[in-house]
Image (cartoon, rainbow, N blue to C red):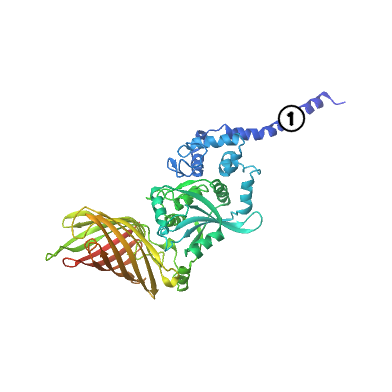
Amino acid sequence: MKSVSESFLLLCRGFLLSGVLFLLSALPAVVYAGFSGASYGRLSPERQLFWKSLLHYSGDRSQINAGSDFFLSPEGYRDPGAEYEATVRIIEAASPQVCDYPARYYFITGREVPESCAEYQRYLDYVPWDEVFTVFATENAAAPISSMGHLMLMTRGLNRRGIPQHYGIGFVAPSDQGSFRLFRDFLTGSIEGRFILNPYDDVIYNYVSLENRSLWEYRLRMTPEERDWLRRHVFELRTHTIRYSFSSHNCASGVGSVLAAAGRQFQGPDNILYLTPLEYAEHLSRHGLIAEIGMRPSASDSRYLREGRVWNPLDRNSPFRISGGYLYRENGRGSRNHGLSGGFLELTPVISDLRDDSRGSPGTAESVFLRTRLEYLGRHLYVRSIDVASFRKIPDLFSGEKFGTSFGFSFRGDHDTLHTSLYPEISLGGSSGFEYGIFSVYGELSGRGAVFGSPEAALGLEAGIFLREPALGRIRFFCNDYLASSGEWFGTRRRIAVSWSRIIVPDFNAGFGFSRDFRKRGRPLNEISGFLTYFF
């Protein structure tokens, strides 16, 4: 028979064991209550910032538009707390919707979504996340809207089935409409886009084989934990309709906002007018986030590689630039002909310019936005021209590109007058060319229309030659003929011009230009300029 002390000890042990079992059984409820009872306001500032990354916030609003079904709360695009509470409610209710938001679920509960989420499990079976790349696709000569290139993600490795795979992930707009309609919709922000997950072999075929565009692959420095967050978040973005905007939410900012969900260091720069694909890639490079660079060359770039002209888009000039310098122009009609000396200032948020000693591509292209030129002549300061958009690509027949299209919309004034009136001009054309050694020869035909006084139209013919030699810089000679309804185009019937530019030190270009305009009436007009360009 047991003593009283032994019985008391056994009783205590029984109470202790029961207490432990009770606590263990209640632990899931405690964890559950911990997140269900917590409010967004009680999260630390760091946690709130991370939550906003999952919602693609930039400032006080999400880059994802208000009407997107990505949000669970009607106010989620501008109220991260409301979206947090809405997410907590679907978790509390054990709603099947939790399967659509594995990153949010992990953020709130600290656990992966249940294994009953069949679609997410299939995604994990097939898509590996051993390595992550940003991929830059160069431009397509036949599509002006591609002038800035395209940016996407690529992930590769062994999937859960033990099969080596790689997938491309990009924020894209539908391509079942013309380039110029797409360009209009991009500018107005009235086109719907989606985050698409495709086998990367399809991406290679579409870009490299069909569109003759090289793919530059930049492997990112990412920890396993960062790749896990990216894996969860990419799944959340599927099927949702998200507004595509050229200026505020394009392929570059879309990729940047996705990567920011893996780590804040991947957030793109926020102090620029708009983020371009190359600017975001350069941002990653400057911050040491690129571990390795690879390339899948197009037919054109394969030829450049064989000739030893290897190039990396990250080496090109900075996109924004300001130019200034001396300007001399003869101005007058009839027997009166006098010269005016002065200066000019030109601000260009640009990707590439035919006049520059460009780095980053052996090709010849121009992608200009909002190039504004101020001139001071005859004691007058005025705006000479504003190029709203100018897309030009001069393809090389020998490299596989046959024809390139061009598009331009600008406001410009007549050389004969000193005024502040600017007339709208729109142009649309095509070009082709070939290379012979260090020379590039091209021809371009364009239709032009403008309204100044009365509507005018013209057919523009341009032929030119480039000389590109690192020691000399870039030399360009060209001539224009205008078959205009009024007999001349902005006071000009024919023009010949020559320009030279060269990088003198990093971020600085020096240049010289001369042009001679032949007119229907009056003497030819000569213009001489010398300039210095700063890239920033």
Where's residue 207, x and y in %? 49, 61
The x, y position of residue 240, in whole percent, is 52, 45
Query: Is 11 situated left or right of 447 in this image?
Result: right
- Residue 126, relative to residue 504: is it above or below? above
Using the image, determine if residue 365 lies above or below residue 114.
below
User: Of residues 221 and 197, which is closer to you in this image?
Assistant: 197
Q: Nearer the viewer, residue 285 or 125?
A: 125
Residue 476 in the figure: left or right of residue 77: left
Q: Residue furthest left?
A: 335
Residue 15: x and y in percent read 74, 28
Number of numbered markers: 1
Name the quarter where the C terminus is drawn: bottom left
Residue 372: tell me if it is visible.
no
How far across and down, in percent of the image, does residue 437 sit? 39, 76
State the residue position of label 1: 18
| SS for callout 1 | helix
Give the quadrant of residue 367: bottom left
Q: Residue furthest front?
A: 485
Residue sitting at 45 percent across and 61 percent down?
Answer: 138
Q: Residues within 10 Å of mark 1 (few under 14, many from 20)?
A: few
Residue furthest to the right in view is 1
Of 243 and 330, the residue lying toward us: 243
Front in this rendered view, residue 176 or 315? 176
Q: Left or right: 29 with respect to 469?
A: right
- Residue at the top extreme? 4
The answer to whether residue 480 is seen in the rendering is yes
238 displayed left or right of 446 = right
Write the residue at 57% across / 31% down: 37
Quadrant, the N terminus: top right
Q: Which kind of residue does numbered mark 1 sit on? A: Ser
Q: Quadrant of residue 18?
A: top right
